[in-house]
């Protein structure tokens, strides 16, 4: 069964502050096979009417069940058994914009660049195995273009990277699509690893609990960012959460006030969906607090709570943290007091 596909908003690795050094574990003794790198975009754009049947069989053998999923969900042209599959795929490959996008991807992401990303991703998988030794590991990195539909996904033991979502903010395609500015600044190589880690963690630890309070969502996303930090311990916080330098300055200078906002009037126990969405969804800012307050602020606050919890409960493993759904207990034991 396929795992849930994740559409994420739009790697320079920078030294993080010393408070995260505990997550920089020694993985020298963790042995795994490097992720198999498959570049689906290079295969798909070789298709033509003359070689279609041969290529179709090749794709099924090379990509397994993922290829069917790519066709049906990523580029939305129906399954390979659909009577319109052949003309639809040829149409996708011959579309002027899709062909131009592919040519752009080839220049921006040559094999050497993708191999470097794959090496870093393999280290992420090693760290995952260190913290979660009994869990299933991804075995492949599949890159593709998919008509600007998906940035990353984790499905069928593959981490999937939609390279057409990382073409830099000057790419004309994004201007044609009227992509919002707050998304544009994150549509570049710097965000590939953080987004892959986020998509993987959100799928691995799916938010399917029936609890629907702001506290639950705050703690859930705090755990996700803490796990991302464990996979990418030397990546700057701003890249992990997608904040600008001024936004990081704002949250760091206003942490106490932000916590006061969440703690007052029992707001953490709010179950109004609109309120929860205002504090957890993407956008240019969090309007209910301030135009200077970055979006998804509940996620950042939750991240700080989890950091405090793990600091004050050193016997708790990352596996135990991620599978603990008692948000109230985590909050209480975090002793979070900014």
Image: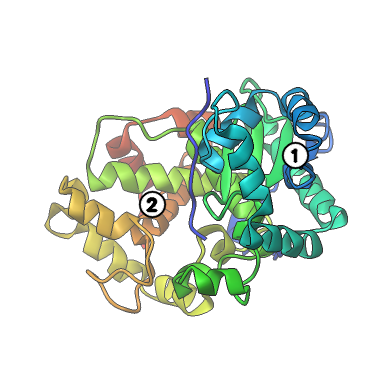
Position of residue 53 relative to residue 196, above or below, is above
* Residue 116 or residue 106, whichever sits in front: 106
Q: Where is residue 284 shown, x and y percent of the image?
A: 38, 72
Q: CA distance from mark 2 to mark 1?
A: 53 Å
Which residue shows up at 69% across the image and 57% down it? 234
Q: Is residue 77 rendered to the left or right of residue 45?
A: left
* Residue 266 or residue 108, whichever sits in front: 108
* Residue 185 or residue 249, whichever sits in front: 185
Residue 167 visible in this rendered orientation of the protein: yes
**Residue of label 2:** 302
Position of residue 71 relative to residue 253, above or below, is above
Residue projecting furthest to the front:
50
Which residue shows up at 71% across the image and 40% down it? 142
Q: Is residue 64 rendered to the left or right of residue 251?
A: right
Residue projecting furthest to the right:
112
Q: Quadrant of the C terminus?
A: bottom left
Which residue shows up at 70% across the image and 58% down it? 99
- Considering only order in the chain, which callout, 1 or 2, is on the residue closer to the N terminus? 1
Q: Where is residue 225 shown, x and y percent of the image?
A: 50, 49
State the image quarter where residue 256 is shown. bottom left
**Residue of label 1:** 49
Residue 317 visible in this rendered orientation of the protein: no
Q: Is residue 301 rendered to the left or right of residue 140?
A: left
Q: Where is residue 298 shown, x and y percent of the image?
A: 34, 56
């Amino acid at each position: 069964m396929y795992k849930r596909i994740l559409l994420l908003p739009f790697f320079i690795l920078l030294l993080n502050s010393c408070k995260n050094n505990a997550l920089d574990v020694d993985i020298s003794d963790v042995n795994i096979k490097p992720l198999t790198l498959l570049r689906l975009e290079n295969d798909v754009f070789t298709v033509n009417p003359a070689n279609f049947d041969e290529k179709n069989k090749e794709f099924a053998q090379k990509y397994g069940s993922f290829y069917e999923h790519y066709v049906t969900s990523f580029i939305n042209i129906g399954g390979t058994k659909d009577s319109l599959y052949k003309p639809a795929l040829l149409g996708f490959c011959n579309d002027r914009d899709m062909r131009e996008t592919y040519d752009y991807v080839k220049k921006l992401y040559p094999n050497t660049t993708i191999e470097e990303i794959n090496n870093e991703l393999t280290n992420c998988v090693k760290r995952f195995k260190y913290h979660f030794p009994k869990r299933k590991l991804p075995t492949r990195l599949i890159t593709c273009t998919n008509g600007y539909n998906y940035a990353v996904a984790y499905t069928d033991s593959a981490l999937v990277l939609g390279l057409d979502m990382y073409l830099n903010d000057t790419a004309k395609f994004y201007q044609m699509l009227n992509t919002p500015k707050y998304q544009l600044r994150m549509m570049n190589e710097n965000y590939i690893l953080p987004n892959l880690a986020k998509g993987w963690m959100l799928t691995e630890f799916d938010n399917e609990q029936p609890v629907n309070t702001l506290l639950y969502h705050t703690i859930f996303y705090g755990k996700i960012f803490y796990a991302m930090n464990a996979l990418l311990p030397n990546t700057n916080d701003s890249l992990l959460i997608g904040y600008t330098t001024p936004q990081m300055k704002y949250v760091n200078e206003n942490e106490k006030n932000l916590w006061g906002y969440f703690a007052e009037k029992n707001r953490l126990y709010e179950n109004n969906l609109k309120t929860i969405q205002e504090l957890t969804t993407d956008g240019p800012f969090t309007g209910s607090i301030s135009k200077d307050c970055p979006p998804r602020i509940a996620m950042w606050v939750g991240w700080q709570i989890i950091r405090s919890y793990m600091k004050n409960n050193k016997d708790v493993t990352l596996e135990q943290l991620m599978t603990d759904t008692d948000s109230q207990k985590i909050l209480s034991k975090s002793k979070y007091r900014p």
